[in-house]
Image (tube, grey):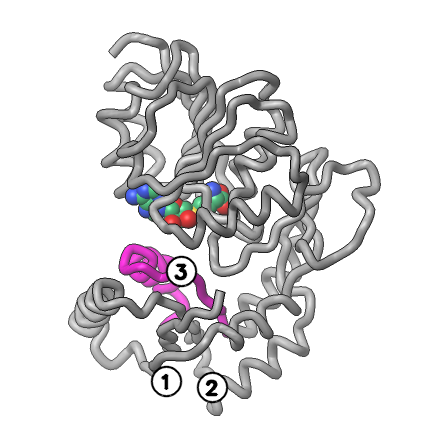
Amino acid sequence: MSQDYFSLLVIYPREDNDYLNLLFMDAGMIGSEIIDPKTIEEYQKRAAEWELSNREELLRVQEKDLGQEITEGFMAQRMFFLTDKKSLAKLDRAERQVYEQYGETIQVIEEGIIDNSHWNETWRSFYKPLDVGKTIRILPAWMEEEGEGREVIKIDPGMAFGSGSHETTLVSLEFLEEMDLRNKAFLDLGTGSGILAIYAAMQGADPVEGTDIDPDAIRTAHKNAGIQDENLDIHFYVSDLLDRVEGSFDVVAANLLYPLLVRLLPDFHRILRPGAKIIFSGLLADQAEAIRSQACDLGYQVLETRIKGEWAGLVLEWKGQA
Ligand code: SAH
């Protein structure tokens, strides 16, 4: 894939990190690199993180990128967006909204179109194997390593979300690990790298489907399934939420942001079998409560809530009657 990307390098107050990420994700951000010595230190303290394995390399990249020091309390982030007209218009709207809200406190260091070699060169060096839950090891596809008793999921995240480095993916995997997936009809809604669908298929789920609104994600997911095991039988296809989904499922994983889950819920039961288990991730902790109560009103039972960092994951059960 030799595609151009629009890169935006900004410095902003660290406390606004979550909000700005949500806002820019909503505006189509397809990936980012955080440039923040403090975050790197915190990542490295947390063992259960498939994080930035090479601090020196990262700091070198930071200096090169920024050409200036980051003031105490601030951090920098390089964000990547697609370059088609629609994506750039969306980004432009988001930028204006940010300026209105933040004015001078957010500083754009650099913006413009780049080719994706920058991304490819730098991010690979930051990954290392990550153990998740009791039995899973996520391994970057270009590494050769034994699982040491763990089940290895090989992932080449490319530009798609779902390298395993994000709490929302980890919570989803933990929930899946605790379920019996054998012969269950499984749907991964917003599959990104395909990681959840691939794991479900490895655990014997059948049939397995993975959908995404982004065709690049679907391509990446296909590729990852092949890297894992060419015999995995997973149907990946493009769909805006449920638009093109026709089957019905015993287990659904939806690692999606709050506004999407709100949009999804009213119509969701159409694809659920009675007793279906649903994993919702991608919620900030305080949004989980809103989803919980909306889901209860619609006839779902909340089986579990799990918090990881600022994020919350839910397991719901569909009781079977709309
Ligand atoms: N399942 C992966 C990726 C989650 S990221 C994991 O758990 O790590 C969320 C994914 O949802 C992204 O790949 C994004 O492209 C996709 N997405 C965003 N809006 C969507 C929509 N309306 N319909 C389907 N997928 C969507």
Is residue 226 in view?
yes
For label 2, the residue is: 66
Q: Residue visible at 56% across and 70% down?
A: 120
Answer few, some or many: residues within 10 Å of disc 1's Cα (few below 14, many 20 plus, some between 14 and 19): some
Q: Is mark 3 within 8 Å of ligand 1?
A: yes
Tell me the CA gap for discs 2 and 1. 7 Å
Compare residues 109 and 303 and report the one nearer the observer: 109
Q: Is residue 227 left or right of residue 24?
A: right
Select label 3 or label 2 by which is in front: 3
Stretch in magenta: 11-35
Question: Looking at the rendering, in which quadrant would you find the C terminus?
Answer: top left
Is residue 284 in view?
no
For label 3, the residue is: 30
Q: Is residue 147 left or right of residue 289?
A: right
- Badge 3 element: loop
Tell me the CA gap for discs 3 and 1. 19 Å
Badge 2 amino acid: Leu
Q: Residue visible at 36% across and 84% down?
A: 110
Instruction: Examine the rendered structure and indicate whether residue 37 appears above or below residue 31.
Output: below
Sequence-wise, which precedes: disc 3 or disc 1? 3
Instruction: Examine the rendered structure and indicate whether residue 13 appears above or below residue 266.
Output: below
Q: Is residue 235 left or right of residue 230?
A: left
The quadrant in which residue 15 appears is bottom left
* Residue 104: % across, % down: 24, 81
- Name the mark on residue 109: 1
